[in-house]
Image: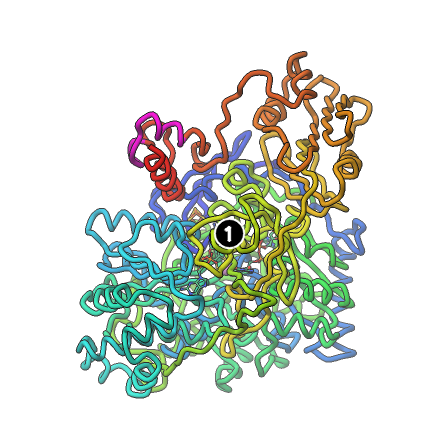
Amino acid sequence: MNAAVGSAEASTTCPYCGVGCGVLAKPGNEVSVRGDPDHPANHGRLCSKGSALGETLNLDGRLLHPEIAGRRADWDTALDTVAGRFQQTIAEHGPDSVAFYISGQLLTEDYYVANKLMKGFIGSANIDTNSRLCMASSVAGHRRAFGEDIVPGVYEDFDEADLIVLTGSNAAWCHPILYQRLLAARKARGTRIVVIDPRRTATADECDLHLALAPGADVLLFNGLLAHLARAGALDRHYIAESTTGLDQALALAAANAPSVEHVAQGCGLAPADVRFFFELFSVTERVVTVYSQGVNQSAHGTDKVNAIINCHLATGRIGRPGMGPFSVTGQPNAMGGREVGGLANQLAAHMHFDNGADVDRVARFWNAPEIATRAGLKAVDMFRAVGDRRIKALWIMGTNPAVSMPDAGRVRAALKACDFVVVSDVTRTDTTRFADVLLPVAAWGEKDGMVTNSERRLSRQRPFLVMPGEVRPDWRIICDVAARMGFGNAFGFAGPAAIFREHAALSAFENKGERLFDLGALADIPDADYETFEPRRWPARDERKAGRLLGDGRFPTPDGRARFIAVRQEGVALAVSAAHPLMLNTGRLRDQWHTMTRTGAVPRLMANAPEPMLDLNPLDAEAHGLAEGDLAHLSTRYGSARARVRITDAQRPGQAFLPMHWSGHFAANAGAGALATPITDPHSGQPELKNVPLRIVREEIAWAGVLITRRNLRPTGFVHWSRSAVTGGWVYELAGTETPDQGILLARGLLATPDRLVEYRDRKGLTYRAAAVDENGALAEALMVAPKGQLPARDWLLSLLGSRAQLTLTDRQALLSGRAPAAVPSAGRIVCSCFNVGVNQLADAVSAGCRSLEAIGRELGAGTNCGSCRSEIRTIIGAGLAAG
Ligand SMILES: Nc1nc2c(c(=O)[nH]1)N[C@H]1C(S)=C(S)[C@@H](COP(=O)(O)OP(=O)(O)OC[C@H]3O[C@@H](n4cnc5c(=O)[nH]c(N)nc54)[C@H](O)[C@@H]3O)O[C@H]1N2
Ligand SMILES: Nc1nc2c(c(=O)[nH]1)N[C@H]1C(S)=C(S)[C@@H](COP(=O)(O)OP(=O)(O)OC[C@H]3O[C@@H](n4cnc5c(=O)[nH]c(N)nc54)[C@H](O)[C@@H]3O)O[C@H]1N2
Ligand code: SF4
Ligand SMILES: [Mo]
């Protein structure tokens, strides 16, 4: 690990989800982290990912020096090359021949200068961000309804609501601390919870009603609700008259689209009684918050889904008052900060837009930018298309891994390969950095210094507590240095993040007499010292008053001051299933992994819950495809293919499969969801449909399987399938192939590193092979076992040998070659609770020993008592144990 800045406990913010929890990080031999008790987002709590932050800080795999064409270069040469190639391309082909693709991982200051450089000084709006895959439909829906991209609610609404509708949100895993807050409120005041998700997720575990609606049917459901509210006399006529326009058209279309509860139920694949229960609950409960996220946004009709939801809140006047409102929760740590600076290609800056000439003029004057872009640029999917057909000739990617996370990822990779000049700024090597002509090493969490904004518009500081290692630099500085080399030094001569933040704040307040609610005017002169000690606060920050909910006064930032109902109708799914692709593939997140696993994938306890890429399938579909639990399946869509093991679960509806989005080429041979996903986008937001693509699955005829346990970080090639998982002291590689076992043995042996200290065993038929290598101290360095499918021995004891680093005993050595543990080592089983490292076998044993409730398990094993995100899985294990008697 790199050196600490000081010894004091630093107060900073978690770099994962949009809940934006405060973290206290104490440097030492290891950095220890705890939740910040004074941070209003989490009041001291952290989820599994947040609590493991200290384990992500070692420097294995960190980029420490700039590289040009794969060779180490010095900063001056690297920056000159970037600036020179961009300038040359612009001179020859115009400003729209270059682009930036950036990210919600960036801090506000990084984001601000990147946006200013591209839109203000290069003079193109070809800057888009991974938020296009994430929040774009919410942004578009907010603008259509409210006139500005405003999230009206605050986290206190989770405490004060009587009904919370979670739609297209697996908050139990993706916004865990907010979800725990909701469960606490439920305990205290009996908050009702309705979950709308085609899958029965962990979030659906604790709810009054789970509506497992047909994928994509959300508009029909919410149109049905709007029509029901009208029929039930639940419309707030006064509010509608005073504060809105367009109800008649929206209601007419909704009523035509969703004429009755039965019609809605049929179209959504739900029971009429369940639909009626939801409608009535919504209609009679004043304090309703509707929380939504990627099941709504990531859709070919995402913007319509957002407006269908907002329509119901407008119709009942339930916006921006305590315990009520539509609440789009943000995904990334600084998704909201990116929206503030205007990091999307169709935004300008500070909630100002290209479609308003006065805005363009205002920003140009503020920046003193004569060449400002005057129209929107290319959105992510179109941007990579333009890279692919050479309209864009120079691309700078910062803080995102599009070779994995973009839909139709195979085409994105081909585009990156074909592109004349690719720059990548990252903290580590990724599938995307392979395409970089210039690779720039940047500061990571713990080293970075700046501002982020969470889902409830609350700004918090990320503060450094570690010295930047090697030659690493912060993103903002790299961007400003390139800008200066391009001749824009005057506009980018910032001394540090505080100076950039002041300019960002000043722009938000510039000629803003309240037309734009986003206003940080009170912070435009914040002294460096106050920026250092900045306490979390929400925007708007026009003056010293504390900001809370917005839009509760029934006034909206539209020209006439009224909110707009948007008439929407249910459209068909973007691509329908067919005989060739009979299943619908849904993709999303797992509890303990973050995106493309560049950080969480290296932490053993975060890998333990789901160590391999798994495709979830309903039992009926598994049977129809001749697939058993754990079988390897070949997955293909019209865009690409992948391989994953099958997990059979009735949490999936028949006809629907689910694959996590996380596995990149660093963690498996070919298990990426991005290669399978469709690049079809929503017409308003340009956000791709990442939740539905027709899928074909075929069982892979596996002949042999292997497991390699090693200290080395490898990237096997030539295997039909491999995946790997971090364990204490190294990695476990699962291998599988369709070759004959003897060929498999040959292939797998090629992975071993230390033939001189190797002991080997091979059975006479050449079907089974075992080998172990020791280091100079006689401790296990690696072990390989290969056997016909289904015959691999258990490996817990091998892992404990790898982890302990103790010298092997004679018994150990014999056991290694016989493939059997020396004594029955009790196996904890797959880890369920990663906070306390409790495995499925331990839980099952505790249930048989009489623990019949979550509380009893918690008392016995600790499991489930910290972050709480494993509670639903524990409940399932208790249920299974009780059912088995
Ligand atoms: N553990 C973890 N947490 C994270 C992240 C992570 O990588 N890991 N990433 C963060 C980021 S950037 C984001 S954007 C958020 C995302 O947070 P979420 O949106 O909660 O996560 P997802 O798993 O992408 O999708 C949510 C749910 O949408 C459902 N869904 C699919 N199709 C439909 C549909 O047509 N209608 C409805 N109503 N639901 C549907 C899926 O079944 C899925 O359960 O999570 C953030 N938090
Ligand atoms: N199939 C499918 N695809 C999806 C989704 C889905 O649900 N299904 N979800 C989409 C969503 S919502 C999102 S948000 C995206 C996320 O997709 P990505 O943005 O590709 O995911 P990350 O793994 O978070 O990539 C962030 C990269 O930035 C690096 N990094 C971290 N901090 C910094 C920093 O401070 N500066 C710089 N320069 N680099 C840094 C990390 O090392 C990592 O390589 O995926 C999208 N893709
Ligand atoms: S809930 Fe989100 S912000 Fe909070 S600790 Fe977990 S990942 Fe970090
Ligand atoms: Mo996201």
From the image, tell me which residue sits under label 1: 616
Viewer-side residue, 455 vs 813: 813
State the residue at coordinates (54%, 40%): 607
Left or right of 240? Residue 542 is right
Viewer-side residue, 382 vs 361: 382
Q: Is residue 55 above or below residue 200?
A: above
Viewer-side residue, 783 vs 879: 879
Q: Is residue 759 above or below residue 457?
A: above
| Quadrant location of the C terminus in the rendered image | top left
Q: Is residue 846 magenta?
A: yes
Is there any visible trace of residue 215 in the rendered image?
Answer: yes
State the residue at coordinates (76%, 79%): 93
Determine which quarter of the picture holds residue 9. Answer: top left
Task: Please state which amino acid type lies under the numbered disc 1.
Answer: Asp
| x, y percent for residue 509 | 42, 72
Q: Is residue 415 magenta?
A: no
* Mark 1 beta carbon near ligand 1 (under 8 Å): no
| x, y percent for residue 110 | 57, 60
Left or right of 586? Residue 569 is left
| x, y percent for residue 871 | 36, 41
Is there any visible trace of residue 245 in the rendered image?
Answer: no
Q: Is residue 285 above or below residue 439?
A: below
Magenta region:
843-856
Magenta stretch prevailing secondary structure? helix
| Quadrant location of the N terminus in the rendered image | top right
| x, y percent for residue 692 | 52, 66
Left or right of 371? Residue 563 is left
Residue at disc 1, secondary structure: strand
Viewer-side residue, 72 vs 566: 566
Determine which quarter of the picture holds residue 868. Answer: top left
